[in-house]
Amino acid sequence: MGVLNRLGGVLILSGMICPQLPGAQQYRLTPEDVTPRGQKEFGLCPDEIASPARLDEFRSMAEEIGGQAGIETARTIRKVGEEMGIDTSEPDTAEALAAAPGIAKLPEGIRASILVTANLGENTLSDLLHRYRLRKDVRFVFRGVPDGMTIPEFGLWLSDLAALTEADRGSAPADMNIILDPELFMLTGAELAPTIVLEDLTRPAPDGTDPGLDLGRIIARAEGFSDPDWLYERHLADNAEDLTNPNVVEITEENLISRAIREAEAVASRLTRDPELLKERFWSRTASELSAMPVTPASEARERELHFMFRASKDITDHEGRVLAHAGEVFRPGDVLPFDRRIFVIDPNRAGELQFVEEALNSPRQGVNRALVIATALPATAPGVDPWQGLQDLVSRFGMQVFLLNDQFRDNFQIEHTPTEIYPQEEESRVLVLSREVAIR
């Protein structure tokens, strides 16, 4: 039996489903270390174009809808096959039920579908699942997935409800049928649960019913009941008409097909291949990330030494293969690779900080092999001018590369205020890494 996988009548759940410290390479700052995630030198990330935001979610919804599309395809195949004289019929449902493992208390060819909802409560649902877990002639049908759940999450939730022991939690209950079939709810007009539907699988569904549906002739229906054997006895006694019970709850799950189509359409409406729109979204997201970690202007001058420690996860060697540090060794990166960068961290929208960098560059520092600027915000530009141009203007102004601040650099180099200058200073046999904040009046 098993819990199977289906949309629109296709069964679901078949086989159910030390603190961070900068490393040696991070210590010797490279463009990758100070470039926002997914972005190098401000070029639009290829993934942004190839995989627009939320594309995976859209694809997931499309796959769900695809289950329904598969039903439509099967109908077409059957129709064409009939016209060509080819037998495309599927195995008889009644025969398949008889051949399935498990216990059947109802007569051969009779199946009970108990239409349920999460609104019944976990205790009631769990009791029902356990009561009929060995019955191959009883299945549980949901109209859709509870709000806030994905289909996989829904499957895990059901497996926990059906578990007999703690060890069973998270695995597929192999001795019961649980399906998602919104069409059965539409055909029976069910809006309250529990509702029992008895089908005679040896007889065809009513005229006008899609022949591709897993449905027999409905012979009895009872609202507010959950005992299929009792209902069959009432049916035999010709006393199964208009059976209702006030102990019902509203079915709260949205029709799965309607939900999948609605959500997929909503996602699709936001997808685009327009390069200009993609760039606009990129810069908007970048600005949002930067504003989420604002760096305030320095109110007073301060100079301090930055200390770094690194634990090697494996041997670190130089280009000639000589071991610089052994695995597990804790050391100061500067003792192996002396810091040789001069870094200016500035707010590009404060004129005083731009002037600070220009004046500082007129006073070279010893031991520096490379200087660069890190901006804590996107430069302000005129309306209609791409932020890229603002960054290029900074490159032209300072004659060096300009990068955007990211949280890893901010944490590793303890950036608290702007402007901050980070530079090396030789002292006896060591190279110190100093951080200098300047108050701009």
Image (cartoon, rainbow, N blue to C red):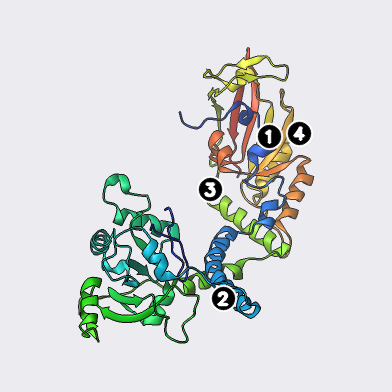
Mark 1 near mark 2, Cβ–Cβ under 8 Å?
Answer: no
Q: Which residue is mark 2?
A: 75
Q: Is residue 102 above or below residue 312?
A: below
Q: Which mark is residue 30?
A: 1
Report helix, strand or loop for mark 3: loop
Sequence-first tag of 4 and 3: 3
Q: Point out the tag, 2 or 4, that comes first from the N-terminus.
A: 2
Which residue position holds label 3?
Answer: 293
Q: Which residue is mark 4?
A: 362
* Left or right relative to 15: residue 322: right
Element under disc 1: loop
User: Looking at numbered disc 2 in the image, what kind of residue is underneath it?
Assistant: Arg
Total numbered labels: 4
Crowding at dot 2, Cα within 10 Å, few <14 / some 14-19 / many 20+, comes out as some
**Element carrying mark 4:** loop
Q: Quadrant of residue 77?
A: bottom right
Q: Are marks 2 and 4 in contact (CB under 8 Å)?
A: no
